[in-house]
């Protein structure tokens, strides 16, 4: 029987002028008590990182052509937005909206063994406001990180240049290196905070700020598993890049579906097969 989760009710996003027709998107299956959030995110074995990817492959191969089509549309949307002045910079706000739809599509594949293209846009029609707020948090945090990286490049990079050399080329190189290191050090926590937030919003009705906090906690407690996930994913991307990068059309959907598998493992306590 298909019906909305409790967390879906009362979040119809009537204020969203870009909402697709509601009749085109059916709610995902509610599978019962197993979908209740754990009291807190659990720590998973490091090996589960590779199991998440294995589950991603199992769901991907159910309707691989449709998954690839959804990925192409998703990338096309972001590329199109990025080419529009000013609006392109705000494209990160749309990331949780699309990724929330991707999570819903993954849920349908997991529960029903089926997939529907319109699920990709379900975040806009069912959860626009909370997911957009998550996007704004993401955008604001990214801006702060960029500003911090720029300041660090000017201060630390300039100081190091004065101690090492007066060569302008060295100055630029040191400043760039410092900015990159600071950016990565600060952006990784931002990414951790956003990683699971869309799934927590669409499946459990968690408010944006608590969802961001839970997401960060879930990632922090599972760094070993995410290291394995990242290493396996990196190898897959390197292999997928060999045939003119066409392999990425397979690798990216699998890694994105694996996020759904990791959400069920960490927040619902569902051991991966």
Image (spheres, grey):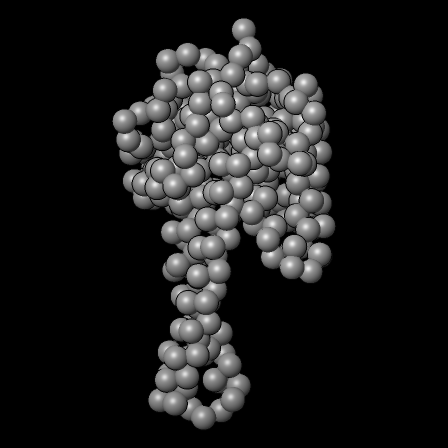
Whole-percent x, y for residue 205 in the image: 43, 27
Most foreground residue, 223 or 120:
120
Q: Is residue 80 above or below residue 98?
A: below
Q: Is residue 70 above or below residue 25?
A: below
Most foreground residue, 108 or 18:
18
Q: Is residue 195 visible?
A: yes
Judge from the rendering whether residue 220 lies leftward or rightward of residue 195; answer left or right. Answer: left
Give the quarter of the figure containing the N terminus: top right
Residue shown at 48% from the left, 60% from the top = 143
Give the quarter of the figure containing the C terminus: top left
Judge from the rendering whether residue 214 lies leftward or rightward of residue 142; answer left or right. Answer: left
Whole-percent x, y for residue 183 in the image: 44, 63
Residue shown at 43% from the left, 39% from the top = 208
Most foreground residue, 233 or 104:
104
Q: Is residue 55 visible?
A: no
Residue shown at 53% from the left, 86% from the top = 169
Residue shown at 57% from the left, 30% from the top = 13
Q: Is residue 177 above or below residue 26?
A: below
Whole-percent x, y for residue 18 in the image: 67, 36
Residue occupying the far bottom of the picture? 166
Whole-percent x, y for residue 201 in the image: 46, 32
Q: How many marks?
A: 0
Q: Is residue 75 above or below residue 37?
A: below
């Amino acid at each position: 029987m298909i019906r909305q989760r409790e967390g879906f009710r009362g979040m119809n996003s009537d204020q969203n002028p870009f909402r697709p027709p509601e009749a085109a998107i059916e709610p995902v299956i509610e599978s019962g008590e197993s979908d209740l959030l754990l009291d807190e995110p659990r720590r998973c074995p490091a090996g589960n990182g590779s199991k998440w990817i294995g589950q991603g492959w199992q769901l991907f191969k159910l309707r691989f052509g449709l998954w690839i089509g959804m990925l192409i549309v998703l990338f096309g949307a972001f590329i199109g937005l990025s080419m529009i002045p000013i609006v392109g910079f705000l494209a990160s706000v749309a990331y949780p909206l699309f990724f929330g739809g991707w999570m819903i599509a993954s849920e349908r594949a997991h529960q029903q063994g089926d997939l529907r293209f319109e699920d990709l846009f379900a975040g806009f029609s069912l959860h626009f406001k909370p997911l957009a707020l998550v996007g704004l948090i993401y955008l604001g945090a990214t801006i702060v990180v960029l500003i911090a990286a720029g300041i660090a490049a000017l201060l630390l990079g300039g100081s190091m240049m004065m101690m090492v050399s007066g060569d302008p080329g060295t100055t630029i190189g040191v400043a760039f290196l410092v900015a990159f290191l600071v950016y990565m050090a600060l952006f990784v926590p931002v990414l951790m905070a956003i990683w699971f937030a869309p799934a927590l919003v669409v499946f459990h009705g968690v408010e944006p700020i608590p969802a961001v906090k839970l997401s960060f906690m879930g990632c922090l407690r599972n760094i070993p598993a995410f290291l394995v996930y990242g290493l396996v994913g990196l190898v897959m991307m390197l292999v997928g890049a060999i045939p003119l990068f066409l392999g990425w059309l397979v690798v990216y959907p699998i890694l994105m579906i694996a996020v759904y598998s990791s959400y069920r493992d960490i927040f619902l306590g569902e051991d991966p097969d």
